[in-house]
């Protein structure tokens, strides 16, 4: 699976250089060659359809009666849509498309159930608020419910622009439990935009503001049973943002994540950031890619077989 924020894809088609950039996004997707894509910052459903046609992927989901026409896209409450793409041969299950445009999300979440070689899986794409707590924590709780409720739902994964670093903990070699992701704001002087990324307190003697990364949303996701693939494997830090020439005051960070439900954690084989010259000129986010070996699952959530 891969997760990729496409940077206003299809929103400003007349802007100079956008056609070239859109073509680069499509080439990145073809080069990564993932089976399932969670994408963010879509203009609308038509933008997702065009991307699917360009890359040879699919995004159409049949309704409960089996008729095609639904698109795996949540257009987003504030104009930044999210979508799902998958390779031919993977089949979306009729009537399983869910959109959450007018739920608690500032942007949105879309989910569909897929038949992957006879195994039933949920796939979701999400884009959390850029404006921090408490809204981002509320959204994280809703992501948990979308992927883990009702009880007995199939295992699954969600790719997201999380707009925050993870809150997953790992056990170090010396036995201590610690955050997997280091605080990217440690050592920085305070600036106004940190109000959306940090918590803070004041030194009672000096009155100086002391800040640190707000990990509350990531902690909620992990506590609710959605595990960051990079933390599960303890992969070294690699930034997904912070290289684009405009629009990001924070510096290099990893705010794009692929999370899986607990049942899928034994099947995670790799988690990485796809970085190359092409990707660095296609979007202000780099794709996050995770390999999941479904043959490794102890319990395979297979579809019912016809009599």
Image (cartoon, grey):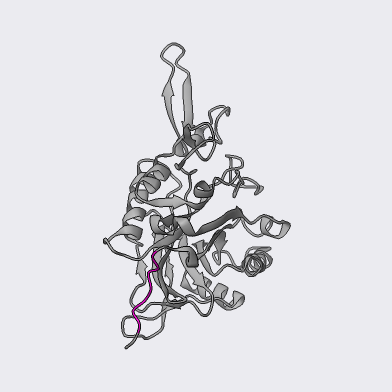
Number of on-image labels: 0
Indicate whether 196 appears above or below 113: above
| Residue 15 placement (x, y as % from top left) | 63, 63
| Residue 59 placement (x, y as % from top left) | 48, 75
Query: Is 273 on the left or on the right of 304, as rendered?
Result: right
Tell me what residue is drawn at x 39 percent, y 70 percent. Answer: 112
* The quarter of the displayed image where residue 135 is located: top left
Tell me what residue is drawn at x 41 percent, y 82 percent. Answer: 69
Question: Which quadrant is the C terminus positioned in?
Answer: bottom left
| Residue 86 placement (x, y as % from top left) | 51, 72
> Looking at the magenta stretch, what is its main secondary structure?
loop
User: Could one spot residue 288 in this view of the protein?
Assistant: yes
Indicate whether 274 appears above or below 84: above
Tell me what residue is drawn at x 63 percent, y 65 percent. Answer: 32
Farthest residue toward the left?
150
Query: Is 26 on the left or on the right of 255, as rendered?
Result: right
Magenta region: which residues?
A: 299-305
Q: Is residue 81 magenta-colored?
A: no
User: Could one spot residue 104 in this view of the protein?
Assistant: no
| Residue 297 placement (x, y as % from top left) | 44, 63
* The quarter of the displayed image where residue 124 is located: bottom left
Farthest residue toward the front?
298
Which residue is nearer to you in this view: 110 or 227? 227
Which residue is nearer to you in this view: 292 or 142? 292
Farthest residue toward the top?
205
* The quarter of the displayed image where residue 283 is located: bottom right
Which residue is nearer to you in this view: 184 or 24? 184
Tell me what residue is drawn at x 59 percent, y 50 percent. Answer: 240
């Amino acid at each position: 699976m891969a997760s990729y924020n496409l940077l206003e894809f299809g929103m400003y088609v007349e802007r100079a250089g956008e056609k070239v950039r859109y073509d680069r996004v499509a080439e990145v997707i073809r080069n990564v060659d993932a089976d399932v894509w969670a994408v963010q910052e879509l203009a609308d459903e038509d933008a997702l359809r065009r991307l699917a046609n360009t890359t040879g992927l699919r995004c159409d989901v049949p309704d409960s009666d089996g008729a095609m026409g639904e698109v795996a896209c949540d257009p987003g409450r504030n104009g930044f849509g999210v979508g799902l793409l998958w390779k031919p041969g993977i089949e979306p299950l009729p009537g399983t498309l869910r959109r959450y445009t007018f739920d608690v999300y500032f942007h949105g979440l879309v989910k569909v159930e897929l038949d992957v070689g006879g195994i039933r899986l949920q796939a979701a794409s999400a884009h959390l608020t850029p404006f921090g707590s408490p809204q981002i924590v509320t959204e994280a709780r809703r992501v948990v419910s979308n992927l883990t409720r009702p009880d007995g739902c199939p295992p699954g994964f969600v790719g997201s622009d999380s707009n925050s670093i993870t809150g997953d903990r790992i056990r170090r070699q010396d036995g201590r439990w610690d955050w997997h992701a280091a605080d990217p704001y440690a050592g920085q002087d305070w600036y106004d935009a940190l109000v959306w990324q940090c918590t803070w307190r004041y030194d009672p003697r000096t009155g100086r503001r002391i800040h640190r990364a707000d990990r509350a949303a990531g902690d909620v996701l992990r506590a609710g049973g959605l595990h960051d693939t990079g933390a599960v494997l303890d992969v070294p830090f690699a930034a997904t943002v912070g290289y684009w020439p405009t629009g990001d005051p924070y510096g290099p960070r990893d705010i794009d994540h692929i999370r899986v439900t607990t049942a899928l954690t034994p099947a995670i084989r790799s988690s990485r950031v796809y970085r190359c010259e092409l990707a660095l000129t296609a979007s202000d986010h780099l794709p996050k890619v995770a390999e999941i070996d479904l043959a490794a699952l102890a319990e395979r959530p297979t579809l019912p077989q016809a009599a």
